[in-house]
Image (tube, grey):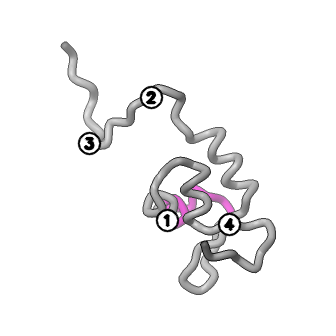
């Protein structure tokens, strides 16, 4: 795993593991500005650890929640 020269930052892969989402999703969060303080260091995103911890508390779905990837409302039985 690639380590960054910033002690208080982590890579996309590390953040993805903590947030339990894909690396692609974390990259999208960075690009959209949803991970405050994230910046590109060459081709690699550097994400502050505090930001990931705060984001995990706010954005992580509750246990047992199933996301609807199609974005459609659930069908009624």
* Quadrant hosting residue 72: top left
Circle number at residue 10: 4
Instruction: Report the residue marked by disc 2.
Output: 65
Q: Are marks 4 and 2 in contact (CB under 8 Å)?
A: no
Q: Are marks 4 and 3 in contact (CB under 8 Å)?
A: no
| Sequence-earlier tag: 4 or 3 | 4
Task: State the residue lying farthest toward the top.
Answer: 77
Indicate yes or no whether the magenta region holds residue 34.
yes
Real-space Cα distance between discs 4 and 2?
Answer: 27 Å
| Sequence-earlier tag: 4 or 1 | 4
In the image, residue 31 above or below residue 19: below
Real-space Cα distance between discs 1 and 3?
Answer: 20 Å
**Nearer the camera: disc 4 or disc 3:** 4
Instruction: Report the residue marked by disc 1.
Output: 27
Real-space Cα distance between discs 3 and 2?
Answer: 15 Å
In the image, residue 70 above or below residue 24: above
Circle number at residue 70: 3
Direction from residue 8 to residue 40 in the image, left or right: left
The residue depicted at 46 percent of the width and 26 percent of the height is 64
């Amino acid at each position: 795993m690639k380590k960054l020269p910033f002690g208080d930052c982590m890579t996309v892969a590390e953040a993805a593991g903590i947030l339990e989402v894909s690396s692609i999703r974390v990259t999208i969060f960075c690009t959209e500005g949803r991970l405050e303080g994230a910046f590109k260091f060459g081709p690699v995103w550097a994400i502050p650890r505090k930001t990931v911890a705060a984001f995990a508390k706010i954005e992580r779905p509750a246990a047992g929640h199933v996301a609807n990837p199609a974005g459609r409302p659930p069908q009624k039985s």
